[in-house]
Image: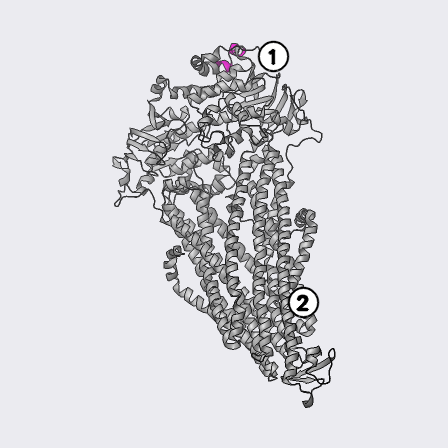
Amino acid sequence: MSSYLTLISFFKKYKRFYIWGILSLIAVDALQLAVPEILRRVTDAIQFGTLDRQQLLFYSIVIVVIGLLMMIFRFVWRILIINSSRRMEYELRNEMFDQFLRLSTSYYSKKKTGDLMAHATNDILAVRMAASGGVITLTDALFLNIAAITMMMITTDIRLTFMALIPMPFLAFAIYRFGVAINYRFKNVQQTFSHLTEKVQENISGIRIIKSFSREKDEIQNFDQYNEDLFKQNTNLALLFGTFLPTIQFISSISFFITLIYGTHLVLNHTITLGSFVAFNAYLASMVWSVAVIGFVINILQRGAASMSRINVVMAEKPDIKESEQPIHLKSITGSIRFANVSFQYEPDEALVLKNLHFTLEPGSTLGIMGHTGSGKSTIPALLLRLYDPDEGEVTLDGISLKKLSLESLRQHIGYVEQNSFIFSTTIRENIAFGVEDATQEEVERAANLAGLHQDILLFPKQYDTMVGERGISLSGGQKQRLAIARALLKNPSILILDDALSAVDTQTEEKILEGIQDTIDAKTTMIIAHRISTLKHCDRIMVLDGGEISEHGTHEELLEMNGYYAHQYQQQMLEEEIR
Amino acid sequence: MSSYFEEEKLEKNYDSVLMRRLLRYARPHLLMLIVAVVLLAFTAVAELAQPYLFKIAIDDHINYTEKEYTLDEDQAVYFDHQDSGDSIKVLRQEGHFYLHSVAEENMLSESQIQTLRSEDSRSVLNLGFLLMGIFFAAFFVNFAQVYILNYASNKIVYAIRHDLFSHLQKMSLSFFDEQPVGRLVTRVTNDTETLYEMYTSVLVNLFKDLFLLLGIVIVMLSLNRQLALITFSMIPVILLASYFFRAKIREAYREVRIRLARVNASLNENISGIRTTHVFKREIQQRHSFQALNQELLKANERENFISSIFRPGVELISSLAMALVIYFGGGLVMDQMIEFGVLFAFINYIRQFFQPINNLTEKYNILQSAMASSERIFQLMDRSPAIDDKPDAYRPEMIKGKIEFKNVWFAYKDDEWILKNVSFKVKPGESIAFVGATGAGKTSIINVLARFYDIQHGNILIDGVDIREYSQESLRRHIGIVQQDVFLFSGSIADNISLNQEYGSDVQIENIAREVNAHHFIEKLPQKYHHQVLERGNNFSTGQQQLISFARTLASDPSILILDEATAHIDAETESLIQLAIPRLMKGRTTFAIAHRLSTIQHCNQIIVLHRGGIVEKGHHQELLKQRGYYHKLYQLQYQSNEKKNPVYLHRHQKPPG
C-alpha cells in the first residue's frame, strides 16, 4: 500500500475537491439513515393510533425533501471526486508519456510494446479505480457502518444490534476472499486469452506453410485446445461469480433471521416497538450493503497498489543517455566524423557488435558500408546519433566528443533513414514535415520530389492530405522508404545516413534519387548502408564489415581487385541486372 | 494492437437477422438454457421472499387485530370454558387483547396472553427457518443456474470461435494477402469474447430482471391493488427519464470510448515509433499532440460524469417519490384499516427492489450494441467463401508418381496483369526442373499455381495426367513439399518444427531426418538439442540454420514432388556447404521444381527454364543452354565461372540427358 505515497502530491493538489466531496458523501449517508427513522415514527404513530393525515403528509414531504437533498449532494460528490480521479488519470498518463519520451532507445529494445501499453492502460485504470471508487466506497461504507450501528443501538436495542451483527465479520471476510480468488482467476482468463491470441496470430502469419504442409486440420485441433482452455478458465471465473452473490445473500440472511426471531421476541415482550423493529430492518439492509462493499474495496485498493508500484518502477527508470551539464550547441557543422577505437555491445552478456572500430569521415565525403546481417552496420549510425553510448572508445563530430554536445543540436544536423522507418498514422504532409516545425508546402514538395515521391503523391485522392493509415499501411514498401527519405531531406541535414533505405525501391528510381540527393546536398557528409552494389559503387570509400570489424575497405575498384566478399556480391548482382 | 485502432466503429443497432443467426448457435443447448431460465425464476422468487415473510410475521403474528387460535392442551388450561382443540377468536385493540368481541369483561389476562403469544413466537421462528431454507436452496439453485448458463454460453462461443477459425483455415492465400493479420486475429479473439459477454451478462440478467419485475408486480397487486397502482404510476416517469437520459449517456459514453481509443492508439504508435521520435528529436511536439488527445479524453470523461451524475441520483429521487407516495396513501389505508400494517412494510421494501431491474434493462443496451457489431463482423467473415474450393468428389490418391505438365498456363494475381503467359513444359516422375530469371519473372508464381495457392485463369496443370483442380487441396499439398525462402518457424521445439505436429514417430526418427539434411550438427550443439525452444519466428537462428530446419521438415513429410525455393540471403560459408550437400539428398527420387541460385543445384536439374516477364525464353539442360549462347550463357559467364573453380565437385557431376 506504500506505493500510493507517490500520489500524495496529487491528493494535496486536489485536497479541496476531496474534502468537500467526502463531506457531501457523508451528508448523503446521513440523509439516507434518516429515512428508517421516519419509518419508525410513522409505524409507531399508527400503532398507538396517534397518526393523522396532516402528519402523514408531513412525513411524506420530508421524504421527498430528503430525496431531493440526497440528489444534490450525490451530484456534488460525484462531480468533485470522480472528476478529480479522472484528472489524476489524465495527469498520470501525461507523466508516463513524458517518461516514455525521456527514456533512451535501449530501454525499448528490452521491453515489449504490449507491456508498456499495459502500464499506460490497465495499471492507470486500476489506480484511478482506487482513487475514485476506492476512496468513495470506503468512506461511504465506513461512515454508514458506524452511523447505522449507532442508530441501531440508540433507537432500537443494544442486544438486538449485537446479535444481528454477528455474521457481519464473516461476510466481510468472505467477500474479501472472493475478491482475491476472482482476481486470480481473472488473471488466468486473461493469460489464456493472450495465449489464444498468440496462437491465432502465429497461425495466420504462417498460413502459407500450414497450407503447404496441409496442416489445417492439425491446426484446428491445436487451436481447439487453446479454445478449450479459455472455455475452462472462463467457466472457472463464472462459477466464482455465480457463488459470490448467493453467498452474500446467505450470510446476510442469517442476520435477518436473527433479527426476525429475536426482534419479534422483543416486540412481543414490549421491549421495543414495532416501529423500531421496522427501522431496524432498514438499518440492517444498509449495513449489509456497506459491509459487502468494504470487502470489495480492500480488493480495489490492493489491485490499485500493485498497479501503482508497477507504474512507480517505470517512472523511476533513468535514461541511459544523459546530456552533459553544459551541452555545446552547434549552429552549424562541417560534418567530419570520427570513430576512435569504438567497441560496443547491446547487452553486457552478449557478443561485441563493434570491435575496436576505427575510421574517420571527411566533411562532404560519402562512405558506403556493406556487410551481412549482424555485422554491426546499423550500430554505426545508432552510435553517431547517440541513441546508444559506446562501451569503449569515442565518437566525435567536428572533433567534439558526442557526449559534450546537446542531443538536440546533434540530431538536428543528422538526417537518418532506416530500412523500416516508422510512419505515423497521419497525413503524408505531416509525416514528411515530422522533423521540421512550420515547413511550407514548397519545402515539403521539394523534399518529396527529391525522394522521387511527388509523382506518387499526386496520384492519391487527397494528395498531400492523404491519411496513410496505421504504420503507413496504405503505402507500398518503396513509397514508405521514399517518404522516410523525404522526411530526412526536409531537415536539410549536414550529415545524411541512408541505412538500407532504398532496398524496396527499384534500381532506376534509386539511381535517380541518389543523383538528386547528390546534386542538392553535394557538400554533405553521407553514409550509405546497403546490400546493392549499384547503390554503393559511387561512394568515395566503401567499408565491408564482418563481425563488428572492417574486413575490406577502399574504393569500388579497389574492392573488386581484392576479390573478396564485395567482389563476390558484385558478380551475383550483375547476373540479375543482365537478365532483366 | 489493432484493436486500439478499431474501437471507433464499435456499435450497431439491434438486427433481427444477426440475432437469429446468433440464436441458431444456441439451439443445441436449448434444453440447458430452458432449465437455467426456470432456475432463474426460482432465484427471483427467493429474492422477493424476505419482505413477504416479514409481512406475514408482522400481520399474522405480531401486529394482528384479529386472529383464530386453535388451543392445545397446555393453552386450554388457561381458559376456563375451553378444551384442547377448540378454536377461539382473539381481537386486539390499542395494545389490549379480547376474546370473541371487544368488551371490558372479555379482556384477556397477562398469563392468557403469554401462552398465546408463545405460539406466535414459535410461528415466527418457523418463518425464520423458512427464510433460511429458501436462501439456502437459492444458494444451490443460483449456483446451478450460473453453472449451466455459463457452460452453455461458453459452449456456444466455443463453437462460434471454432467455426470461425476453421473457416479461416479454408480460405485461400489470396484472401490472406488482402487482410491485415491483426484484423483477423481480432475477429477470432476479441469479437467472439464480446459475444460471450453478451450471452452471459445480457441474456442472464435480462431474464432475471424480467422475472424480478414480474414477481414484484404480481406480489404488489395481490397485496393491495390500489397501492400497487400508485407505485406503478412512477414507471412512466422513470422510463421517460431513462429514454431521455440514456440516449445522452450513450452518446457521451461513446465519445469517451472513441477518445480513449485515440489516446491508446497514439500511445501505442509513439511507443512503437519512439526511435524515430528520438532520431528527429521531436519529443516536445509529440508530447503536445498526445496531451491534446489526452485533454479531449478528460473532457469527454467529465461530460459523461456530468450527465450520469444528474441521471443516477435522479433515478434515486424517483424512488424517493414513490416511497413518499406509498407512505402517504399506504399510511392512510392503514389508518382507515383498509390494509394491515405488514402490507405497507412489504411495499416499502419492494420499492427498493423495484427500480433496479428497470434501470438494468435500459443499461444492457450498450453491451447488446457492441455484441451486434461484433457478430456482424464475425458473420461477414464466415460468409466469405474461399476462392479455391474442392470439388465434391475430389480426387484423393494415396500415392502419386509425380509426372507434371503445364499446358498453356496463363496466370494473373490481379485482372489482366499477366504474371505467367502461356507457359508450357513437362517433367517426368523423379526428374527435376530449374527456373532461372530475374525478380518478377514469374518463378514464384509457378510454385504458387502448382501448389494451387492460386488458381490459374487459362490452361491446365496436370499431375499424373489429372488436372490439379480435380484433386482435393489436402491430398495435392500432401504430396508436394515446399522449401521456402523465408522459413517460417513456429513457436515450439525444434522437433515440433521438423515433425510439424504430425504423429511422427520417435525422436530417433526426427534425428535421422535431421542428419540426412545436415541439420543434426548444429541442433546437437544447442543446450536443449531437439527440444530447444524456437523464439518468436525463429529469430534465434541464422538464415542458413533455418533453411536446414526447413529441409528436415520437408523430408519428414516425404513428398513425391519437391519445390525448392533457395534463399538468396547471405549464408556463412560453413552452413552454405552443408546446404549444398543436403540439396541432392533432398531431391533424390522426387520430381523437383527448383528456383535455384546455386550453380550446383541448377546443374543437377534435368531441365532448365529461363523465364523472362512471365514467358519462357530458353529451355533445355545445362549443356544445351550453354550452346545456345543466350541468357543462360551470359548468366553462366558472369557468375558461375568463378564459382565453378571454387566448387569443382559439382562441376564434374554426371548430368542425365534431359527427357
Residue B279, x across and y down, in percent: 37, 40
Kindly identify the residue that appears in the image at 57 percent across and 77 percent down. Answer: A266
The answer to which of B408 and B37 lies nearer the viewer is B37
Q: Horizontal and vertical percent for residue A100?
A: 39, 46
Dot 1, crowdedness within 10 Å: few (<14), some or many (≥20)?
few
Q: Is residue B230 above or below residue B97?
A: above
The residue shown at (51%, 29%) is B487
Q: Earlier in the sequence, mark 2 or mark 1?
A: 2
Q: Is residue B307 visible?
A: no
Query: Is residue B321 within the magenta segment?
Result: no
Which residue type carries mark 2? Val
**Type of amino acid under label 1:** Gly
How many residues crowd around disc 2 within 10 Å: few (fewer than 14), some, or many (20 or more)? some
Span highlighted in magenta in the image: B624-634
Q: Could you tell me which residue is drawn at 45 percent across and 51 percent down?
A: A123
Query: Residue at label 2?
Result: B217
Principal secondary structure, stretch drawn in magenta: helix
User: Which chain letter goes with mark 2?
Assistant: B
Q: Which mark is residue B659?
A: 1
- Along the horizontal axis of the image, is A369 left or right of B454? left
| Secondary element at tag 1 | loop
